[in-house]
Image (tube, rainbow, N blue to C red):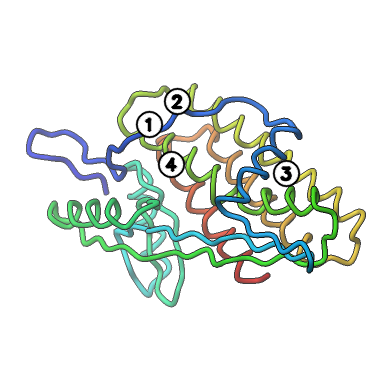
Amino acid sequence: MQQYDADGNEIPYIIEKKRTPRRFGRIAGALILISAAVSIGIAVRILFFSGTVTIEGRKFFAVYTAETSVESEASAASESVRNGGGSGYVYNDGTFKVFAAIYPDEESASTVASRLTANGTNAGYMVLTVPEIKLKGYDDRTERLRLAETVYYAYGELYDELYELSIELDEKRLSEAAAVKLTADYRESAADRLDYVSERISVYTRDATLVKLRNAYIKVTEALSATSAADKTPPASRVKYAISEIVITMRSLAEEI
């Protein structure tokens, strides 16, 4: 449920922080390879003698505002959270937790959870870890770079872009139409990567890892498509829900491979 301060102003689930300029438009294949090359020093370690690509993991911090063992209660709480501008994503780790938002750092999550609790909502936060991923069996250097970039993009650059977008929506500095345009651009970038992975499957026909990566990107593109849904859910909520879906999807992928 959305909280308000003493002056009647909404208390957002996203807190203000420094921002970096957003990149727009379609990412061409050449730019993807450049991004992949840069990521070697940031997120990817490549062992050329073995053909192994090691992609660093990442930690996220999910604030939740409801926790219950009853699924119907979680569904009702989810609707309330989404109407208030939060994610409303229901995560089941033995109990049903309803996410308000997923943050890139523990300080932000702790601050928001404490503020919500102080205003009458029992909130907490949990760590969501996308573990380190190892890809093996790809002997071409360019292909290793491209696959590594494809894996990391969803919980790296894409997450960062969506997180900044959610801040702007919370602070009402961006219109819904502009947000829909941006998420459409992000979906196109994700779809480019989905097409690439699908093409690679036609070459490596027995590669189970590529199939799992393709299935993950299908979910990523679907989550981005849902942000432009014509319903009464606030656009900020739809973006936060997509963030939750993407982080959980990539976390599951990393654990499976």
Distance between the alpha carbons at the discs numbered 2 and 1: 8 Å
Q: Nearer the viewer, mark 1 or mark 4?
A: 4
Residue identified by numbered label 3: 193
Distance, label 4 to label 3, CA atoms, is 20 Å
Q: CA distance from mark 3 to mark 2?
A: 26 Å
Asked which secondary structure carries label 3, the reply is helix
In the image, is 9 to the left or to the right of 144?
left
Q: Earlier in the sequence, mark 1 or mark 4?
A: 4
Q: Residue at x 45, y 73 (%)?
A: 93
Instruction: Specify which label sits upstream in the sequence, 4 or 2.
Output: 4
Residue at x-position 63% and y-position 65% = 133
Q: Residue under circle 4?
A: 163
Q: Are marks 4 and 2 in contact (CB under 8 Å)?
A: no
Of callouts 2 and 1, the N-terminal one = 1
Which comes before the other along the chain, label 3 or label 2? 2
Name the amino acid, label 2.
Answer: Glu
- As measured in the structure, the alpha-carbon distance from the residue carrying label 1 to the one carrying label 4 is 10 Å
Residue that label 2 marks: 176
